[in-house]
Image (cartoon, helix red, strand yellow):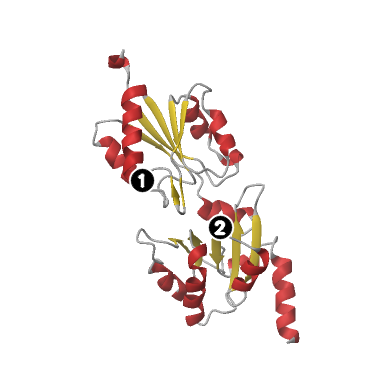
Amino acid sequence: MHNTIKPKVTLVGAGPGDPDLLTLKAVKALAEANVVLYDALANDEILAHAPKNAIKIFVGKKIGNHAYTQDQINQLIVDNALTYGNVVRLKGGDPFIFGRGSEEIEFIESFGIPTVVVPGISSVVAVPASQGISITKRGVSESFWAITGTTSDRKLSSDVALAAQSSATVVILMGMHKLPQIIDLFQKEDKGDLPVAIIQNGTTAEEKVGVGTVDSILEVVKQQKLSSPAIIVLGNVVRESNKLKGFYEEFLSKEIVR
């Protein structure tokens, strides 16, 4: 019987959290899965698109709680593909944006197993957009940086210091534990008045938003008890958002009175 099994792995981007932001291609791929290996998704409703009898294995990583190491995940994908055929590896956001998807593909293909990638809507753009923040805007920001706050050796990315020097919008993922260091780098560039938005659990029902400036955002985080998973957006485009405009008008009028 095993001779008839045709192993195949599809890496699917699950999007930023809102299950309606799953692509049609992702839904079709899940519908054909024999096995789904999934991350700590912002929304488990996405798993409902897989057949009821499909094997579903949680392989997610959260800080201090790794169900599996990356090497074990790689091996699990291959073992399940060889045993059951069609495997969907479901990853939050987009598989190739801070998702280690390329490492998984290299490993899978070294066994001669064909792979397909279904891109996902990345939280880099979708989460700011959900708050009306256009991360590029003519006359305000002509580019953006997307940076991981924490590198593989648990340090702050050296790119943050470079980004702080530019006029681009800066979007930082996985950076909440390094927020004081990030703020310090922007203050060193004399950007204390730069608008900042922190969006926790973006695009989901649990979404929480804190807005301020480089100088005030740490206090905002403390007051509103914001924590991971969250996206940090630094740049003048934050002030341009219709949703957030009221806050900045109020903030600036207080500054003028002062």
Find residue 232 and report its horizontal and vertical position in percent: 54, 63
Q: Quadrant of the N terminus?
A: top left
Find residue 38 and report its horizontal and vertical position in percent: 46, 38
**Could you tell me which residue is drawn at 42 percent across and 44 percent down?**
95
Along the line of sight, which residue is nearer the eye, 141 or 195?
A: 195
- Tell me if mark 1 has few (under 14), some (14-19) or many (20+) residues whose alpha carbon lies within 10 angstroms of its own: few
Along the line of sight, which residue is nearer the eye, 214 or 245?
A: 214
The dot on residue 230 is: 2
Left/right of residue 70 with respect to residue 233 in the rendered view: left
Sequence-wise, the earlier of marks 1 and 2 is: 1
Question: Which image quadrant is residue 137 in?
Answer: bottom right
**Could you tell me which residue is drawn at 35 percent across and 61 percent down?**
153
Q: Which residue is mark 1?
A: 69
Above or below: residue 182 compared with residue 208: below
Residues at circles 1 and 2 in contact by the CB criterion of under 8 Å: no
The secondary structure type at the circle numbered 1 is loop
Above or below: residue 117 compared with residue 201: above
The secondary structure type at the circle numbered 2 is strand
Above or below: residue 166 compared with residue 198: below
Mark 1 and mark 2: Cα distance apart in space? 23 Å
Above or below: residue 35 compared with residue 58: above
- The residue at the far bottom in this view is 258
